[in-house]
Amino acid sequence: MTMALATPVGIKKPALAALGMLALATGALESVVTPTLPLLQRELDMSPAEGALLSIMLLITGALITPVAGKFGDRYGGKKVLIRLMAVVAVGGTVSSLAPNLPVLLLGQVLQGAMVGALPLSFIVVRKHLPAGDSKVAIGVVSGLFVGGGMAGTLSAGPVAEGLSRHWMFALPTLAVIASTVLVYRLMPADPPGRSDDAGVDWPGLALLSGMLITLMLGLALAPDLGSQPVLLVAVLVLLAGFVAGWTAVERRAAAPMVDLAMLTRPGMWKSCVLTFVICIGTSVAVYLVPQLFAVSEDAYGFGASATETGFFLLPGAVAASLAGPLSGIGARRFGSRAVVTAGIVMMACALVALALVHTQIWHLIIGKMLVALANGLCVTAMVSSTATSVDEGDTGIATSLILVTRVIGYAVGVQVSGAILTAGTPSGSDTPAESSFVTGFVMAGVVTALSLLVVRSMGKREKHTA
């Protein structure tokens, strides 16, 4: 399916194609861990909680880098910052491909996390080169291609890891990232810098945000043990509260805050962030639990699927997610973001509850995961495109980065909670979690997702959209 986008003088279709190729490559590199997580847990002797930590380490870095990338992109130009960010991603992919153990692999994932910042930078470039109506569709297409790359990574990671080695499943998409970055550098015209200021970088705000996110993630990773250690639980909560209070105070006083709290308090902005957070919790629970359920032995209640088989089982969901981006962009332009988000939330909540009730056949999981992926793509893309085109052009990067950071945090929280539920539900001396732990995870995610409809109801009914 081709999309006819207006291309003003200064940007050509090969340049947009190069940007799309980069989205495909980064999506592929981001997605290789999910279908091979059971394999990596076996080869590197990881517990379910350690596996959950590995699956979100990339996202933790992404949450830290994204606001910086958005801020710098607004200030210095999206293309300029994007190229430098991709150099870090290439190094991270190389480290992951050569990693002999879990600590080195975690380091590679930390560096790869810079790729999350590529999306707001791509949106800056698109916004500056296309009119608002076409920008919504173009942002949907870029988002869809990123998810399409995830489809390619999901499908190929298992066969590559089992046919060659786990090292090659990182190396191949890293080479694609390097090649597509070169094309973007050569073909994409530089976008003009935005408004400049002399306030410099808000390093204290970034440091406090980093501490806040790391404390939150470590607290979630240690959740199964914190219940039996109340002193440690209180210490983690106090430390987290301290980081939150300090970060809020610093951002309010900063001349050029890393995250603009004034922007975050706008009704449209904070509601989009809340919805993104909740929706991504629901999505991440399915993303983490479904492959684990595929891998459970047939002697128990699972299917004993290999990494290759798991990749094929997840393929329909990846296809649905890749189509959701363009469909959401078109739907938001025609019907408004609220209608698209409402439809996505209802679809996701129903799919998660259905997975809790019925998961005895492989096709149950395939259909459920496909509906969750489609719903997530519809909702998040609608909110990102709406946010990107509703703020001043000079704020595109930081505004979309707020949504994407919230997406990352929601995903990380959902994965860590899912890992903690499985760890707590694994009997002593066994490697297989109780089936009830999967049911608990799906039900929890479905209920939380459904509650987000309360936020949607408070959104304005009338939106500016074009037929």
Image (cartoon, rainbow, N blue to C red):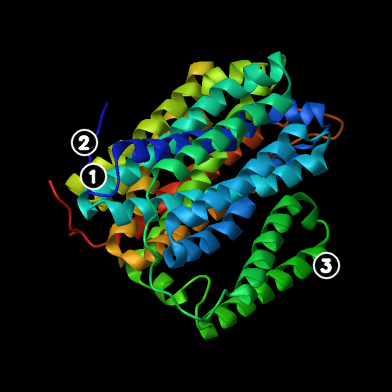
- Looking at marks 3 and 2 on the same chain, the residue that comes earlier in the sequence is marked by 2
Image point (68%, 31%), residue name: 37
217 left or right, relative to 262:
right
Q: Which residue is situated farthest in the left direction here?
A: 467
Instruction: Indicate which label's residue lies in the foreground, 3 or 2.
Output: 2
Mark 3 crowd level (few <14, some 14–19, many ≥20, 10 Å Cα): few
Q: Are marks 1 and 3 in contact (CB under 8 Å)?
A: no
Q: Residue at x 42, y 77 (%)?
A: 262
**Residue behind mark 3:** 231
Residue at 73 percent of width and 71 percent of height: 239
> Picture coordinates of residue 464 (x, y %)?
17, 58
Identity, as a three-letter code, of the amino acid under mark 1? Thr
277 lies left or right of 390: right
**Separation of residues labelled 1 and 2 (CA atoms):** 9 Å
Q: Secondary structure at mark 2?
A: loop
- Residues tagged 3 and 2 counted as in contact (Cβ below 8 A): no
Nearer the observer: mark 1 or 3; the answer is 1
Residues at marks 1 and 3, CA–CA distance in whole angstroms: 60 Å
- Work out which quarter of the rendered image holds the N terminus and state it: top left
Front-lying residue, 296 or 85: 85
Q: Indicate the position of residue 355 as horizontal and vertical percent values.
A: 50, 30
Number of the label disc, if any, that sits on residue 7: 1
- Residue 228 visible, this orientation: yes
Q: Earlier in the sequence, mark 1 or mark 3?
A: 1
